[in-house]
Image (spheres, helix red, strand yellow):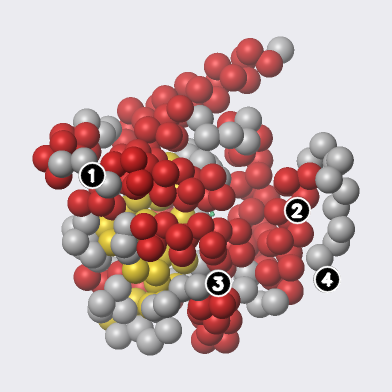
Amino acid sequence: MMKKIPTSHPRYLSLVTREQISEAMRHGIVHETGLIAHGRGEAFDYLLGETTIPPADVAEKIAASTLLCAKNPVISVNGNVAALAADVCISLAKSIPAKLEINLFHRTSVRIKKIAAFLRKKGAKTVYGLNPNAKIPGLDSDRALCEKEGIFTADIVLVPLEDGDRCQALQRMGKTVIAIDLNPLSRTAQAASITIVDNVTRAVPRIEHWIHELKDTKRSDLDKLIKTWDNTKNLAEVLSFISKRLNSLF
Ligand code: PTJ
């Protein structure tokens, strides 16, 4: 049972989110190490001020432009993403449109089935990842397992809360990887084609906002926008934002 948190608590949203993720762990959706990953994410979110910072919003706009130009875009879902952002991922997938594929680091068929049932209950029609028939080359973990119609042939993959290895392996396959990671120093953040340093709960709805804003934009104009993107420069802006913010606090 979810613990009741008083709405007057100054850390209400954070505490509710913790309850949400620990309940999802009790239901077998989140892996126990997902709680550790969440704690690390919380710490970095504090540094950002728990808000979408301007360089993240630029990354979200570029991500939306890239997804709109994609031939076979796929949103990769793991335990933490299902627990915290199932509704918004389903909604984003419909708006692009993109496919949803479950891909787990700590893969068990029981967990995959539970996450698929959870996504379907929330309105997802087709969920990939249950019957993997392909492997991402050069990756030893179970994260290599994927579906031919999904991640394997995707040109653009959106990967919230990723591990660096798969991010690099997907890029070696020639794919564009859009990562959502609160830690700008992680291997994933450093390796992705487009890194969004924001909480998945804010980033996904913000990408969808940009999808609606840009839907009628000419393809050539979207291409021009995408060409302006420099991931290293954006990460430097994120770090500069954090250090200026910390300096201004005292
Ligand atoms: O469900 P599974 O089996 O696929 O496992 C998922 C986890 C998250 C356990 C697995 O992918 C993992 O161990 O991830 P890492 O290597 O701990 O990386 C997680 C990254 O996500 C860290 O850099 C965190 O800062 C970041 N993060 C955590 N929570 C959020 C987040 N980024 C965005 N939004 C969050 N809410």
Q: Quadrant of residue 101?
A: bottom left
Judged by depth in the image, the label closer to the viewer, 4 or 3, is: 3
List x then y, in percent, for residue 76: 41, 65
Note whether ligand 1 is within 8 Å of mark 1: no
Pointer 2 local density, CA inside 10 Å: few below 14, some 14–19, many at least 20: some
Judged by depth in the image, the label closer to the viewer, 1 or 2, is: 1
Label 2, secondary structure: give it: helix
Looking at the image, which residue is at 27% across and 57% down?
Answer: 156
Q: Nearer the viewer, residue 192 or 113?
A: 113
Residue annotated with mark 2: 16
Please state the quadrant of the image where ligand 1 appears: bottom right
Pointer 3 local density, CA inside 10 Å: few below 14, some 14–19, many at least 20: few
Judged by depth in the image, the label closer to the viewer, 1 or 4, is: 1
Q: Nearer the viewer, residue 6 or 175?
A: 6
Mark 1 and mark 4: Cα distance apart in space: 45 Å
Residue annotated with mark 1: 216
Residue annotated with mark 4: 1
Note whether ligand 1 is within 8 Å of mark 2: no
Looking at the rendered image, the quarter that the N terminus falls into is: bottom right
Mark 1 and mark 2: Cα distance apart in space: 37 Å
Mark 4 and mark 2: Cα distance apart in space: 13 Å
Label 4, secondary structure: give it: loop
Mark 1 and mark 3: Cα distance apart in space: 28 Å
List x then y, in percent, for residue 191: 34, 47
Q: Residue furthest front?
A: 216
> Label 4 amino acid?
Met
Q: Nearer the viewer, residue 34 or 208?
A: 208
Q: Residue furthest left?
A: 220
Residue annotated with mark 3: 122
User: Could you say which disc has been placed on residue 44 in the image?
Assistant: none
Q: Are marks 4 and 2 in contact (CB under 8 Å)?
A: no
Q: Is residue 222 left or right of residue 142?
A: left
